[in-house]
Image: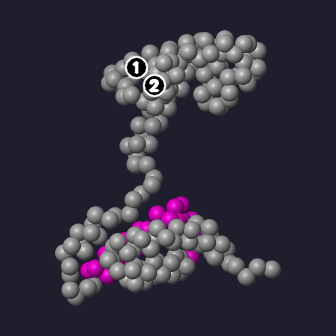
Amino acid sequence: MTWLRPIDSWFADTVYVHQAVHRRYAHRLTGSAEEGEELVQEAYARLFALSDWASIGNPHAFTMRIIHNLAVERFRRAEVVHLDRGIALQSLDPADDAPRPDQIAAARAELRRVSHALDALPERCREAVHLRRIEGLPPREVAERMGIAVSTVEKHLVKGLRLLVERLALPDDSGAATQDTAWTRTARHDKN
């Protein structure tokens, strides 16, 4: 029989594991270890007061935001305002680890272009590139799966990667030139 509630396990697994980061961040915001610790404890208390705690997608980022908001709230209520602390609060906005919408859209567009370029490869080259680069199999296993020699796998890889680089270097559908992507850099490195 366990005495832990579900929220206790959730807190320990997803929030408290980052407690050192929370304390450092709160200390930077307040300029005092004691005030920072108070912010962290208040943030944790607010988490435990939530009824829908299980629906929080990124508990660490959510906790960082609570700490930031508490620091701003304390700053606004302070009778004596230090200008340097106000600037620090603005500059120490918690970092959001999630990619921005424009980054997601660009990554999806690049993935579509690479997928189309892969589909345009000759069948054996596509199979070799897929097994080696996407599934991460060693050349010997790729050769076994394809029923060919390792040297033939290497030839298919070189040809497939060269064709991919050439295809991805062409302007995309919108007419804009493609940026130097991780795929093309990897392909150039393997070619050399």
What is the quadrant of residue 12 in the picture? bottom right
One can see residue 21 in this view = yes
Q: Residue at the spot x=46%, y=31% of the render? A: 182
Q: How is the image coloured?
A: one colour
Q: Residue at the spot x=45%, y=37% of the render? A: 107
Q: Is residue 188 left or right of residue 174?
A: right
Q: Identify the secondary structure beneath mark 1.
A: helix
Relative to 85, residue 185 above or below? above
At label 2, the amino acid type is Thr
User: Where does the image place residue 27, in percent across and percent down from the top left?
Assistant: 38, 75
User: Where does the image place residue 116, in percent across and percent down from the top left?
Assistant: 52, 23
Label 2 sits on residue: 184
Q: Identify the secondary structure beneath mark 2.
A: helix
Count neighbours of disc 1 (C-alpha within 10 A) and say few if under 14, some if 14 to 19, many if 20 or more: some
Q: Residue at the spot x=66%, y=15% of the render? A: 153
Q: Is residue 95 left or right of residue 8?
A: left
Would you say the residues marked 2 and 1 are in contact, meaning their CB atoms lie under 8 Å apart? yes
User: Where does the image place residue 2, in percent across and percent down from the top left?
Assistant: 76, 79
Sequence order check: which comes first, mark 2 or mark 1? Answer: 1
What is the number of callouts on the image?
2
Q: CA distance from mark 2 to mark 1?
A: 8 Å
At label 1, the amino acid type is Ala
Count neighbours of disc 2 (C-alpha within 10 A) and say few if under 14, some if 14 to 19, many if 20 or more: many
* Residue 180 in magenta stretch: no
Label 1 sits on residue: 169
What is the quadrant of residue 156 in the picture? top right
Relative to 44, residue 25 above or below? above
One can see residue 53 in this view = no
